[in-house]
Image (spheres, grey):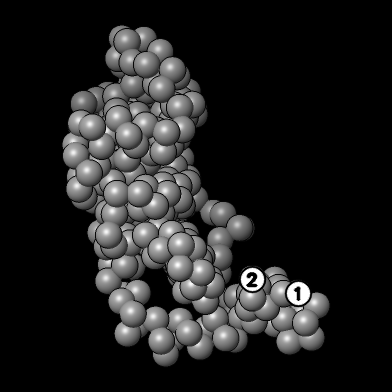
Amino acid sequence: MFNNRLLYLWSPLLLLSGWELAARLAWIDARFFPAPLTIFHYLIFISPDEGIFQDVIASLSRIFFGYSLGAFFGISLGIAMGLHRLTRLGLYPLIAATYPIPKIAILPLIMLIFGIGELSKIMVVAIGSFFLILLNTLHGVDSIQKIHHDVSSVYRIRGWAYFRHVIFPACLPSIFTGLKLAIGYSLVIVVAAEFSGANKGIGYLIWQSWETFSIHAMYAAIFVIGLLGFLFAYSIDWLERKIVPWHTNNNNLS
C-alpha cells in the first residue's frame, strides 16, 4: 500500500521538480511562473495573514450545502426514474434538454431568482451536482441484472425490503461514481461563480490576485484548489471502500 502511494505521487512531484528547475535556471519567466518553493513559502507563511483561510472556508461551505442538496435530490430522483416508468417518461426529456446547458451560464438567471448572496452560489453548485449524480444513479438502477429481480420475485421480497436489500446496494457503485464526478465539478463551479458577485472565496481570491497582479497569491489559490480536489476524491474513494466493500476497484488511490 505504501509503495502504491509513492507511485501515485511521482507524477506531481516530477512536474513540480521540473518547474522548480526551469524557474531557477530562468528557462521560464518567473514573473508569470514563479518557482513552486516560493509559492509554497507564500502559501504557508504569508497567505494566512492575508485571509486565505476565510476564503477557503467560504468556498467549502458553499460546496458542502450545494453538493449535499444536489446529491439528495439526484439520488432520490435517479432511483425514482429508474424504478417507475411514468416518472422517467415524464422527466427524462427535461433532464436531457437542460443537462447540456453550462451551469455557470445560468448563474445570472440564478442570481436574478435567488439574489447575489450565498444562496445563488449554493444553488448553482446544487444544480451542477444534481445532474451528474442523477444520471449515474439512473444508470446504476438500469444496470441491475435481471437475475436479481427474478430471485427477489421468487422469494417474495417486495416493498422497502426489496429496495433496501436489492435496488440500493446494486446501484451504490454507480452512485459513488456520480458523487466523485460531482464533487470535482462542484469545485469548478463554485470557483467560477465566485469570480463575480462574491467578496470571499477561492475564486474571489484568484480574481482579485489577477486584478492586482499578485501572482504568488493566484498560484497559491490554484494549489489550494488542486489539494482540495485530491482530498475530495480520496475521501469519497475511502468512503466507497467502507460502504461498498463487495465492489472491488483496482484503481483506488491506495
Callout 1, which amino acid? Ile
Q: Which residue is mark 1?
A: 28
Image quadrant in which you'd find residue 85: top left
User: Where's residue 92, x and y in %?
Assistant: 39, 16
| Residue at 35% from the left image edge and 49% from the top image edge | 196
**Is residue 10 shown above or below 96?**
below
Determine whether the residue tagged by mark 1 lies in a helix, strand or loop. loop
> Which label was assigned to residue 145?
none
Q: How many marks?
A: 2
Q: Is residue 101 visible to the viewer in this orientation of the structure? A: yes
Alpha-carbon span between mark 1 and mark 2: 8 Å
Q: Is residue 176 visible to the viewer in this orientation of the structure? A: no
**Is residue 106 shown above or below 244?**
above
| Residue at 34% from the left image edge and 37% from the top image edge | 107
Q: Which residue is mark 2?
A: 32
Q: Nearer the viewer, residue 149 or 188?
A: 188
User: Where's residue 138, x and y in %?
Assistant: 41, 28
Image quadrant in which you'd find residue 63: bottom left
Callout 2, which amino acid? Phe
Determine whether the residue tagged by mark 2 lies in a helix, strand or loop. loop
- Tell me whether the residue at label 1 lies in contact with that at label 2, contact meaning CB atoms closer than 8 angstroms: yes
User: Where's residue 62, x and y in %?
Assistant: 27, 54
User: Where's residue 176, x and y in %?
Assistant: 42, 47
| Residue at 41% from the left image edge and 38% from the top image edge | 104
**Is residue 45 shown above or below 29?**
below
Where's the C terminus, which quadrant? bottom right
Q: Residues within 10 Å of mark 1 (few under 14, many from 20)?
A: some
